[in-house]
Amino acid sequence: MSRFLESPVVGMAPWIVFSLLVGPGRFEIAVGIALGASLVLIGLGRWVHRGTSWKLLELADVVFFAAMAVVGVLADAGTLRWLETYAGEVSNLALTVIAFGSMAVRMPFTLQYAREQTDPALWHTRAFLRTNYAITGAWGLAFLVAALAGGFGDLVLHDPDNLWTGWIIQILAIVAALRFTAWYPEVVRARARGEAGPGWASLLLPLAGLLVPLGIAVLVFDGGVWWLGVALIAAGALLTKALRG
């Protein structure tokens, strides 16, 4: 628990939950869960790590979801329908702006979390800063992909609950960013020691393994393309075996 609360993932968790839950008839529930999660995670963080500073992402969590809750209460039926349809894209684009905006002002949002786990002597080293730029950029790209996928489902397919644009592509983007967040610092530390470090196979292995449950989901929820579900399961099994080899 302590390690999770020190990770930038804790600040992004409410946004991820919100973007995956929101949809027709679910706006109030999604906002309530996301706002509640924001407050609980901040409270836990202050209780476990007393004296820690406020993070940009934590403040954005509370402000954004509190504002969305107020708008949801005051909105008329037409505005509420718009929010139910597009709030997922709005939240993903907001996170994209936060990620790339924080890089533009030379304070990638992961830096505040990383400094609490790192010797101050390393805070201004090139490797430490480059690592945080890379991880923040990876999250910015992940949320941009999620926003584009959701937007395609809403604007082109006119299907906010489309399995691919509303779930699979967005989940894959988030999992890829999560895996990169864990993998890349290990690579940097290994290089600093003059060692080979983890290779690309270790980065891609969890993503290959995810193809199997995604294939099963396609078979269960999208029987019209059953062949794609079978292909995903086969590809996941074969890629997992190859990467482990």
Image (cartoon, rainbow, N blue to C red):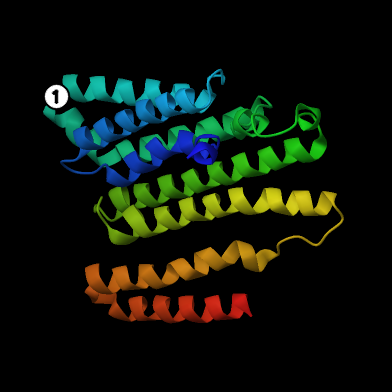
Question: Which residue is nearer to you in this view: 149 or 123?
Answer: 123
Location of residue 2 in the rendering, given as x and y in whole percent from the top left corner: 51, 37
Give coordinates of residue 9: x percent, y percent.
50, 40
Say what secondary structure mark 1 lies in: loop
Q: Does residue 55 lie above or below 192 as drawn?
A: above
Above or below residue 99? Residue 224 is: below
Residue 105 drawn at (x, y percent):
66, 24
Front residue (pair 70, 204):
204
Q: Residue at x 32, y 28 (%)?
A: 35
- Farthest residue to the right: give it: 194
The residue under label 1 is which amino acid type?
Asp
Quadrant of the drawing holding the C terminus: bottom right
Check disc 1: other Cα within 10 Å, few if <14, some if 14-19, many if 20+.
few
Q: Name the residue under label 1.
A: 76
In the rendered image, residue 11, in percent from the top left (x then y), is placed at 47, 33
Q: 92 and 59: which one is in front?
A: 59
Give whichever of 85, 129 is nearer the camera: 129
Residue at (51%, 32%) from the top-left corner? 97
Apparent side of residue 200 relative to residue 195 in the rendered image (left or right): left
